[in-house]
Amino acid sequence: MKLYLASGNPHKAAELQALAVRDGLLAQIVSANTLGGMPPVVEDAGTFVGNARKKARALQPRLPADAWVLADDSGLCVDALAGAPGVDSAYFAGPEGDAAANLAKLVGLMRDVPAAGRRARFVCVLLVAGPEGAEPVFEGRCEGWLLCEPRGGTGFGYDPLFVPDGQTRSFAELGDAVKNGISHRARAWAQLAEWIRGKIFG
Ligand code: IMP
């Protein structure tokens, strides 16, 4: 089964494809980058589900009518910031979507927050749009806390600042295989994988 990923983020495509391979699932994740790029989407729906729906519907017209589209909208929600950056995670420091600037802004805002106030969670919504019309949604979360300074060199986005519960190292130190075992995206994927199995095997 081909899933056209409504995202230009190569890290999301790589993580989702690695999850499919790990699960032995016959699902191919085809990045929008291979289709001439992801059409611009204003992510102003205010919810992860709403933004995911906008992304899926932006890519759909570029595909055959029987294609399946997968959208991923995700972000980091920080308790001390009343849930920010949340749905605005990609554009926290400005409309350019500069990941390094986003990370630096978060480090600055959290500088004086004591350990007890550094709780945060990643949220990932995966939404499928396809010929059947229904748009099933699968949500995964990963709870953890924020370091004071970024650590590690793998992953993307806020990974260097986020330590998942049960670990002492950041996602960017733990590496892709460990991250894919426990991440918000992996947890949303686990539900999507069940849905895909139903489609493939009836
Ligand atoms: P989206 O592309 O609009 O869904 O924005 C997602 C943003 O949330 C990314 O640009 C990252 O800043 C952040 N984010 C989502 N998932 C992850 C992750 O797995 N690791 C690190 N940052 C993430």
Image (cartoon, rainbow, N blue to C red):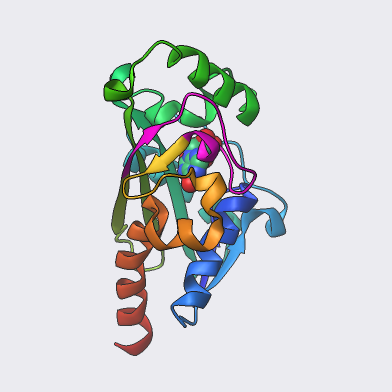
Q: Is residue 44 left or right of residue 12?
A: left
Q: Is residue 97 above or below residue 68?
A: above
Residue 176: % across, % down: 55, 58
Front-most of residues 56 and 157: 157
Q: Is residue 1 above or below residue 142?
A: below
Question: Is residue 3 shown to the viewer in this render?
Answer: no
Residue 2: % across, % down: 53, 73
The residue shown at (29%, 59%) is: 136
Residue 36 located within the stretch drawn in magenta: no
Q: Residue furthest top?
A: 112
Front-most of residues 144 and 30: 144
The residue shown at (40%, 53%) is: 183
Front-most of residues 102 and 74: 102
Front-most of residues 133 and 123: 123
> In terms of secondary structure, what is the magenta stretch mainly?
loop
Q: Is residue 67 above or below residue 143?
A: below
Q: Quadrant of the C terminus?
A: bottom left
> From which residue to which does the magenta span run?
143-161
Residue 29: % across, % down: 56, 67
Q: Is residue 114 above or below residue 76?
A: above
Question: Is residue 189 shown to the viewer in this render?
Answer: yes
Residue 25: image quadrant is bottom left
The residue shown at (52%, 52%) is: 174
Q: Residue furthest bottom?
A: 201
